[in-house]
């Protein structure tokens, strides 16, 4: 993998901090983090790898800083058969199963519809169980990078 775009949806900064920590672990790839991304930002990775890291708000919704990208992808529906992706979804299961990690579930489903290829199953992190999401995300991210490297080879 030569290039990784990390697209972050965050309300209180937890997803941002996780994205920055994970990105700092990479030395072999060009990594860019997007906190207020546009469709053009995302499309720059149409033949590369993207990682969506998002918290979930309210009734299982996508945070305001990531919602415009989601809406643009849904409305314009660009097919992305060369793109590879992963999703880390942050949520709290105490809000109900139908809302838990809703933002990540929505992005995962949309990217599949756009023909992007998941290189690793979505990681759902429950804030009620894991106070520090890095405890769970670290090993998942290592495997995600290894899988993305294999697919790119």
Image (tube, helix red, strand yellow):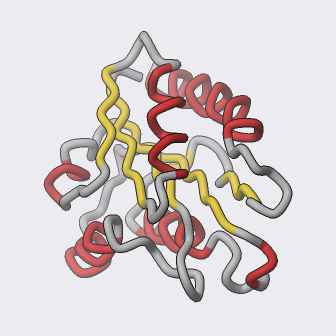
As drawn, 118 above or below 20: below
Which residue occupies 31% across, 21% down? 30
Q: Nearer the viewer, residue 88 or 83?
A: 88
Q: Position of residue 93 (x, y in %)?
A: 79, 73
As drawn, 60 above or below 69: below
As drawn, 54 above or below 102: above
Kindly give the residue lying farthest to the left in the view shown.
Answer: 40
Quadrant position of the N terminus in the picture: top left
Q: Position of residue 121 (x, y in %)?
A: 68, 50
Which residue occupies 36% across, 52% down? 81
Kindly give the residue lying farthest to the top in the view shown.
Answer: 28
As drawn, 111 above or below 32: below
Give the image quarter of residue 135: top right
Q: Is residue 27 left or right of residue 106?
A: left
Q: Nearer the viewer, residue 95 or 146?
A: 95
Q: How many marks?
A: 0
Q: Position of residue 41 (x, y in %)?
A: 19, 50
Which residue occupies 19% across, 59% down? 38
Q: Is residue 20 left or right of residue 137?
A: left
Q: Position of residue 48 (x, y in %)?
A: 33, 36
Which residue occupies 58% across, 88% down? 59
Kindly give the residue lying farthest to the front in the view shown.
Answer: 12
Q: Is residue 38 left or right of residue 87?
A: left
């Amino acid at each position: 993998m030569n290039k990784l775009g990390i697209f972050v949806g965050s309300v209180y900064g937890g997803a941002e901090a996780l994205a920055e920590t994970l990105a700092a672990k990479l030395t072999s790839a060009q990594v860019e983090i997007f906190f207020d991304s546009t469709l053009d930002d995302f499309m720059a990775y149409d033949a590369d790898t993207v990682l969506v890291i998002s918290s979930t708000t309210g009734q299982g919704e996508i945070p305001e800083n990531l919602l415009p990208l989601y809406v643009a992808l849904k409305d314009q529906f660009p097919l992305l058969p060369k793109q590879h992706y992963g999703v880390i979804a942050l949520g709290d299961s105490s809000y109900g199963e139908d809302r838990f990690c809703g933002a990540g579930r929505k992005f995962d489903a949309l990217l599949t519809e756009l023909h992007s290829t998941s290189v690793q199953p979505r990681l759902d992190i429950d804030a009620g169980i894991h106070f520090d999401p890095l405890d769970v995300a670290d090993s998942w991210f290592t495997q995600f990078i290894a899988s993305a490297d294999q697919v790119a080879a």
